[in-house]
Image (tube, grey):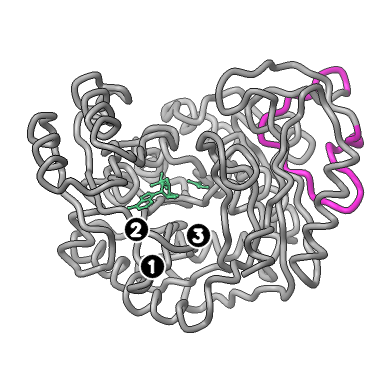
């Protein structure tokens, strides 16, 4: 098979490396890709959000399947456009991708189908939102932009002042454009967070191994929110008992709810969960593989990813065996100094071989360029240095050793990835 992957980060690199293990895969393409991905797949410069450009590229390359990995092209309807041309595409269509594209939609869905989540109200008028905040008078309060906001659309306000400011800048100031014309104000929940990605063809849903993200920039979960500074899998907070409860009360009900709404979800459905004292609740849905969760989940997959993608597209997932390796996996993100705010680009990276790899790890490139035989930094998150092992402790040790082999000016990484999991 010839497969084209859309996107250009660590998640796409992990998908491509896993696909490259399949004996059925003859050729891998990626657009736009990045420096590291270009060593494993032929890259093009069509943007991930350029639907017409991607359809034309897929036709020109005569690919057998397109894997649409990022949220924005999915929410914009890239899968619909590919399927209209008869090109099989892995990922939800526009009607189903709304589960991530609109938090107001996903909250209403959960309310209607009794899927456990934080209590909430939806507002498109800042005065009404502020009146509600004053009436509730409960802090922290959680304020979320309705639409996609590059992972920055959630504010945990510690006081009325902060909450009012967040509401005004989102609704009145259109801080995230039309994405924040509406906001969800919800109850603050506590408990460990778990990410569970799943494969679903709308009839069968198969959860993948659980994982834990580390969203804050600095050690001890301090500093600004980022796209994710590291991950581990499996997540020790996700016991078998909790997994069973999630399957019964959250995963299957969500798949069925989407079917009932006429929005059958096919692809990777991501459940962002919090294990509260009252049981697991949904914090968010994503309509795609998580980044950097994918980097620790796919290395533990012991089945052919190409077969699974094909089964999801054809609706034959129930007949496709999906096996997992034992052991654990850890990913440490090396970021540019300054991330998630401003940072330089174009710094030379040392310690990588010609394929962009180093001993003892899979190095998934998130933001690199490959020029004149050298890797350069080209983004906020630069590399996801990932190792697997029999135990989490061993996987972390290997990943941090590999991080020690690699350097660029002002590289920043957290030293405590997996620490909380080891102590839990
Ligand atoms: P999201 O972008 O929806 O994943 O939210 C970002 C982060 O905000 C989550 O990973 C949680 O840590 C936190 N968060 C979101 N919703 C809530 C909530 N209702 N209660 C507490 N924390 C939350
Ligand atoms: N790591 C969280 C996400 O992909 O949204």
Q: Residues within 10 Å of mark 2 (few under 14, many from 20)?
A: some
Q: CA distance from mark 2 to mark 3?
A: 16 Å
Quadrant the C terminus occupies:
bottom right
Work out how far the residue at label 1 is from the one at label 2, CA to CA, in angstroms.
7 Å
Residue 324 falls within the magenta-colored stretch: no
Q: Tell me what residue is drawn at x 54 percent, y 37 percent.
A: 226
Q: Is mark 3 within 8 Å of ligand 2?
A: yes
**Badge 2 or badge 3: first in the primary sequence:** 2
Q: Which residue is mark 1?
A: 276
Query: Which residues lie in the magenta part?
Result: 351-373
Q: Is residue 110 left or right of residue 38?
A: left
Tag 1 secondary structure: strand
Q: Secondary structure at mark 2?
A: loop
Q: Please tell me which residue lies in front, 165 or 303.
A: 165
Among the 4 quarters of the image, the one containing residue 396? bottom right
Q: Are marks 1 and 2 in contact (CB under 8 Å)?
A: yes
Residue 189 is marked as 2
- Residue at 61% x, 45% y: name it: 11
Q: CA distance from mark 1 to mark 3?
A: 14 Å
């Amino acid at each position: 098979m010839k497969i084209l992957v859309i996107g250009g980060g660590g998640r796409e690199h992990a998908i491509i490396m896993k696909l490259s293990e399949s004996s059925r895969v003859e050729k891998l393409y990626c657009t736009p890709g990045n420096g590291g991905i270009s060593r494993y797949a032929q890259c093009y410069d069509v943007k991930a959000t350029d639907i017409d450009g991607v359809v034309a590229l897929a036709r020109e390359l005569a690919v057998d399947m397109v894997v649409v990995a990022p949220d924005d092209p999915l929410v914009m309807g890239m899968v619909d456009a590919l399927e209209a041309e008869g090109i099989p595409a892995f990922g939800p269509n526009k009607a189903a991708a709304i589960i991530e594209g609109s938090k107001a939609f996903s909250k209403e869905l959960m309310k209607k189908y009794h899927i456990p989540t934080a209590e909430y109200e939806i507002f498109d008028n800042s005065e009404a939102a502020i009146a509600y905040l004053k009436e509730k008078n409960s802090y922290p309060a959680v304020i979320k932009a309705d639409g996609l906001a590059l992972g920055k659309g959630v504010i945990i306000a510690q006081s009325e002042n902060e909450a009012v400011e967040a509401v005004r800048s989102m609704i009145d100031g259109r801080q995230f454009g039309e994405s924040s014309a509406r906001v969800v104000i919800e109850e603050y929940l506590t408990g460990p967070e778990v990410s569970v990605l799943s494969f679903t063809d709308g009839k069968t849903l198969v959860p993948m191994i659980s994982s834990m993200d580390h969203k804050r920039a600095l050690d001890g979960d301090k500093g600004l929110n980022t796209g994710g500074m590291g991950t581990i899998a499996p997540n020790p907070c996700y016991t078998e008992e909790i997994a069973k409860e999630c399957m019964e009360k959250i995963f299957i009900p969500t798949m069925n709810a989407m079917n009932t709404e006429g929005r059958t979800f096919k692809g990777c459905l991501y459940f962002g969960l919090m294990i509260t004292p009252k049981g697991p609740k949904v914090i968010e849905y994503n309509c795609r593989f998580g980044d950097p969760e994918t980097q620790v989940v796919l290395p533990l997959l012991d089945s052919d990813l190409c077969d699974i993608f094909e089964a999801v597209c054809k609706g034959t997932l129930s007949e496709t065996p999906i096996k997992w390796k034992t052991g654990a996996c850890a990913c440490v993100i090396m970021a540019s100094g300054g991330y998630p705010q401003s940072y330089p680009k174009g710094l030379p990276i040392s310690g990588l071989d010609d394929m962009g790899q180093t001993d003892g790890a899979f190095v998934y490139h998130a933001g690199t360029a490959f020029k004149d035989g050298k890797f350069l930094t080209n983004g906020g998150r630069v590399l996801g240095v990932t190792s697997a092992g029999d135990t989490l402790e061993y996987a972390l040790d290997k990943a941090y050793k590999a991080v020690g082999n690699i350097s660029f000016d002002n590289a920043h990484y957290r030293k405590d990835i997996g620490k909380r999991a080891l102590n839990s």
